[in-house]
Image (cartoon, rainbow, N blue to C red):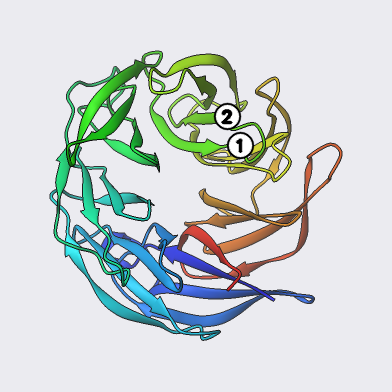
Amino acid sequence: MTLIWAGAYTASMGGFSRGISAVRLTEKGLQFAGIGAVTSSPSYIIHSPVEGMIYAVDEANGRVEAFLRKGKSTALIPMGGQPTSGTEPCHLAATPEWLYAANYRSGQVDVFPIGADGKIGALHQSLTSSGKGPKPEQDGPHPHSTLAFGDTAITADLGTDRVNVYRWADGRLGLESSLELPAGTGPRDLAVSPTAGKVYLLGELGGSIFALGGGRNLQVVQSGGSGAAPGDHAAGLVVDPTGRFLYTALRGSNRIVAVDAKTLEPIADLPSGGDTPRGLCIVGNLLFVANQNSGTLAAFQLDPQSGIPMMVGTPLFIDSPTCLLPDFS
């Protein structure tokens, strides 16, 4: 049985969760398995490079926290954390040595060292930028996600319509290049193809999808869209294990969209199974969608040939989910 951790908004961020929930995927469908950790607004969670450790943001209080899972237990043991330099951290990324936290509201990306035991060390560096975009949400820098690998970190900044590339040198990260996207794009989420090595970018404010290339000198090599309706805000971007299809969610019209990875054009869309779809993950041939405001977790079976999703079972009620993290340990 696969376990899925669900990060969520607690009351401090307008949600109704108590912390990180555990959900089991069984032959009978999705089953709530209890609260893994009572904690403040863990709206984004990731696995640590250290086995058994999970990192979470505390979006309400401006912190990053570590939790330990022992064996097959659904209980998460708090292992301490660190304050961020800014406000509303909304995303995390990790390499074996470093943890990256995007502070959405105040505009910095913080870098923390990761100890051999998986614990989070004191702040090492904050990456800052400047600028703004044409839409109300773009009044200044608002980094929303980071992709980190080797000596490189890529940040998507919703507020400035830029994707910034940083490189480690002499113990610090320096700006290597900056890719400017069309005005009003609102860069939000980054995803990597498991087969082609391509990097994809989702624009929240227009629903655009871009394929990026060029190494550290990033360039747009292809662009497409998700079929967003007026007023939609796109969220979540995942690639299926074959690399042939992308999936994203549209908050507003509350739809899930399947996109052809070759053409970057939508091939199907359907209701998300709730209100305000935000976090997505794929386990095998199943796509899971966290519907934040309705408090539902929906499952969709993916057709292996067409990539088209079809809802299976009944959505599971769960407290204000925002992020999903499969755990196969």
Query: In terms of image quadrants, where is residue 258?
Result: top right
Q: What residue is pinned by disc 1? A: 193
Locate residue 56, reporting x and y percent: 34, 63
Locate residue 298, reporting x and y percent: 65, 59
Q: What residue is pinned by disc 2? A: 198
For the point 16% across and 42% down, which residue is it? 126
Q: Nearer the viewer, residue 167 or 316?
A: 167
Q: Is residue 267 left or right of residue 107?
A: right
Q: Is residue 290 left or right of residue 258?
A: left
How many residues crowd around disc 1 within 10 Å: few (fewer than 14), some, or many (20 or more)?
some
Locate residue 88, reporting x and y percent: 24, 51
For the point 68% across and 28% down, which residue is it? 261
**As shown in the figure, which amino acid type bears the numbered disc 1?**
Ser
How much space separates mark 1 and mark 2, taking CA atoms? 5 Å
* Residue sticking out furthest to the right: 305
Q: Quadrant of the N terminus?
A: bottom right
Q: Nearer the viewer, residue 19 or 276?
A: 19
**As shown in the figure, which amino acid type bears the numbered disc 2?**
Lys
For the point 15% across and 45% down, which residue is it? 125
Residue 94 appearing in the image = yes
